[in-house]
Image (cartoon, grey):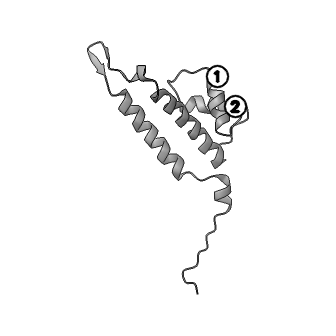
Amino acid sequence: MNNLQRLQLETKGINLDQSELTVYLQENDLQPFDEYNPQSATSKRNIYRSALSVLESIANNPSLMKTVKMDDTTISDFADSIQSRIDQLERKIRTLKTDDQIANESNFFMLFSN
């Protein structure tokens, strides 16, 4: 699976051209056709950052934020739902560490110092 396919998994239901998704990936330091490495914390974090960029650009489209009525059902909370997902992704990105941070971790800390 390449990075582009992984981003499409993360943004299921959102239909964007490959060229648009490629731009989001490149803005977040990923090449679209490179192999996705699920063991890399940095790759995972950059995929989530790319998905966040996609959602934020959708949230900036005012025509999607209007109330829609389909078959006696009102869909008015799209803006709330997308903002909730954006907040979830932001929290997840903040808690994820990069490969460098994981490599620099130590299991030793000083309880007392002079």
Give the distance between the C-alpha atoms of the residues marked 1 and 2, in whole angstroms. Answer: 9 Å
Mark 2 lies on residue: 32
In the figure, residue 48 lies in which quadrant? top right
Q: Residues within 10 Å of mark 1 (few under 14, many from 20)?
A: few
* Farthest-out residue, top: 71
Residue 37 image point, x, y percent: 68, 42
Q: Amino acid at mark 1?
A: Gln
Q: Which image quadrant is residue 31 in?
A: top right
Q: Residue 103 in the image: x percent, y percent? A: 68, 60
As helix, strand or loop, the secondary structure at mark 2 comes to loop
Which residue is found at the position 55% from the left and 84% from the top? 112
Q: Quadrant of the C terminus?
A: bottom right
Residue at the image point whose x is 65% and y is 47% from the top? 42
> Are circles 1 and 2 on residues that touch, CB within 8 Å?
yes
Does dot 1 land on a helix, a strand or a loop?
helix
| Residue 83 location, quadrant | top left
Tag 2: amino acid: Pro
Above or below, comparing residue 13 to residue 25 in the picture: above
Left-right relation of 103 to 16: right
Q: Residue furthest left?
A: 72
Q: Mark 1 or mark 2: name the one nearer the start of the chain.
A: 1
In the rendered image, residue 3, in percent from the top left (x then y), is placed at 66, 34
- Disc sitting over residue 26 in the figure: none
Reading the image, the residue beneath label 1 is 18
Q: For the view shown, which residue lies furthest in the right direction?
A: 34
> Which image quarter holds the N terminus?
top right
Q: Nearer the viewer, residue 56 or 70?
A: 56
Residue at horizontal 59 percent and vertical 75 percent from the top: 109
Q: Between residues 58 and 111, which one lies in front from this camera angle?
A: 58
